Image (cartoon, rainbow, N blue to C red):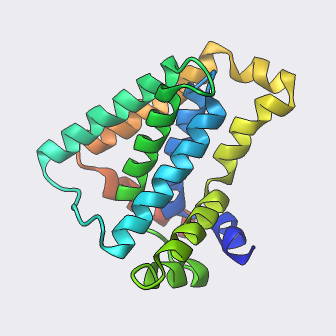
């Protein structure tokens, strides 16, 4: 429970926003498959963050080709999420996992005591730390998951979230994310978010 609560406590912190904002935008775009996209994103970001910490993924994010390919990938997952037909859709699962993995690859965690323990123990306690990483990310991405669950609980929320302008807002955030990646300004934007959060 403490791991989940530490994740929840990190929601307003700049480094967490770098993973949370794309998740919320993707959920807004995925009209018919919000919950699948949100849960798949959660799995993707937890898996790649854990893989990086444990040394199973050591590819660095650099170079013009990498920036452009990543931006194209972001556009692709947003289009897939938008076109997903329903909760059991392969497009919904794939877009969520890939977008989450991209976020996990880019994410530079703000280390609290529980997350620090997870990251430091990945090579000796693989299964345990992977489970704890999922729990931590469930807390950190709670707003996106709640936004995905909301239409199932409140019909009025579904009617509001199904309106085209909501998907347009999510798509605009996704487009901005792609442009930030394509121009190599990701670290600069995260740094600015951090500066704003600590001022």
* Residue 146, above or below 48: above
Question: Where in the figure is residue 132, as x and y percent of width and height?
Answer: 59, 71
Question: Where in the figure is residue 69, as x and y percent of width and height?
Answer: 21, 38
Question: Where in the figure is residue 24, as x and y percent of width and height?
Answer: 58, 40
Q: Quadrant of the C terminus?
A: bottom right
**Left or right of residue 122: residue 139:** right
Picture residue at 47% right of the left edge, 51% below the top: 44
* Residue 195, above or below 43: below
Picture residue at 57% right of the left edge, 64% below the top: 13
Q: Quadrant of the N terminus?
A: bottom right
Is residue 108 visible from the viewing direction of this image? no
**Left or right of residue 20: residue 95:** left
Q: Quadrant of residue 50?
A: bottom left
**Left or right of residue 74: residue 110:** right
Is residue 45 visible from the viewing direction of this image? yes
Question: Where in the figure is residue 124, as x and y percent of width and height?
Answer: 43, 85
**Count of labels in the image:** 0
* Residue 174, above or below 116: above
Taking the view exactly as shown, the residue that stands out farthest to the front is 127
Picture residue at 51% right of the left edge, 82% below the top: 116
12 or 25, which is in the foreground? 25
86 or 59, which is in the foreground? 86
**Left or right of residue 105: residue 68:** left
Picture residue at 58% right of the left edge, 62% below the top: 134
């Amino acid at each position: 429970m403490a791991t989940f609560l530490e994740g929840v406590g990190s929601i307003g912190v700049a480094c967490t926003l770098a993973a949370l904002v794309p998740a919320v935008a993707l959920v807004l775009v995925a009209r018919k498959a919000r919950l699948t996209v949100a849960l798949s994103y959660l799995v993707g970001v937890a898996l790649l963050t854990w893989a990086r910490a444990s040394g199973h993924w050591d590819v660095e994010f650099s170079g013009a080709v990498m920036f452009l390919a990543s931006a194209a990938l972001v556009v692709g997952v947003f289009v897939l999420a938008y076109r997903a037909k329903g909760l059991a859709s392969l497009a919904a699962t794939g877009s969520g996992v890939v977008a989450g993995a991209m976020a996990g690859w880019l994410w530079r965690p703000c280390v609290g005591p529980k997350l620090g323990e997870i990251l430091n123990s990945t090579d000796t306690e693989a299964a345990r730390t992977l489970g704890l990483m999922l729990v931590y990310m469930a807390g950190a991405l709670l707003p996106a998951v709640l936004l995905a669950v909301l239409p199932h609980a409140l019909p009025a929320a579904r009617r509001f979230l199904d309106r085209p302008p909501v998907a347009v807002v999510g798509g605009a955030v996704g487009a901005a994310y792609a442009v930030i990646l394509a121009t190599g300004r990701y670290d600069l934007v995260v740094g600015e978010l951090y500066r704003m959060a600590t001022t």
